Amino acid sequence: MSGPDGGVEIVAGQDMVEEGPPNPYFATRSCRACGVLVFGVVQAPEAGGPAVRVNVRTVDGVDLHGVPVLWLDGLHDTWAPLGTVPYPSPSAGLEVQ
């Protein structure tokens, strides 16, 4: 299954991906079972569109530990950079028994 503009290829589980509600700025595809956003296409130029955005947490084998995360000010619609921090490990603070 190819995504909008041919920018995404789903190699397994195509039947589990559903199109989100109509939106003129962002076309989404989500997991039918859990609702997690898998990918989408941004059309709004102020958001860098048109461009495909992929939720890399849904891609097998991707390790985000330590990847820089840029926080932006969406609360005040300025989208100004607020700071950058490393992506936390999902298992940080968990003890293995």
Image (cartoon, grey):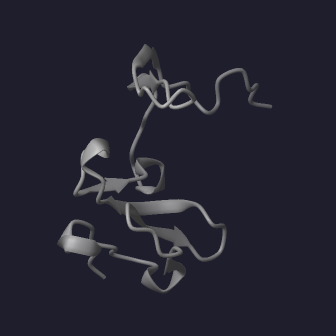
Quadrant where the C terminus sits is top right
Looking at the picture, how far across and down is residue 65, in whole percent? Answer: 46, 28
Quadrant where the N terminus sits is bottom left
- Residue placed at 52% from the left, 69% from the top? 30
Q: Is residue 38 above or below residue 21?
A: above
Q: Is residue 61 above or below residue 94?
A: below
Left or right side of 19 for 61: left
Tell which residue pokes out farthest to the left in this image: 6
Query: Which quadrant of the structure image shows residue 34?
Result: bottom right
Tell which residue pokes out farthest to the right in this image: 97
- Residue placed at 37% from the left, 61% from the top? 25
Q: Is residue 75 above or below residue 24?
A: above
Left or right side of 97 for 35: left
Looking at the picture, how far across and down is residue 74, in whole percent? Answer: 51, 31
Query: Which quadrant of the structure image shows residue 33?
Result: bottom right
Looking at the picture, how far across and down is residue 60, in whole percent? Answer: 42, 55
Looking at the picture, how far across and down is residue 62, in whole percent? Answer: 39, 45
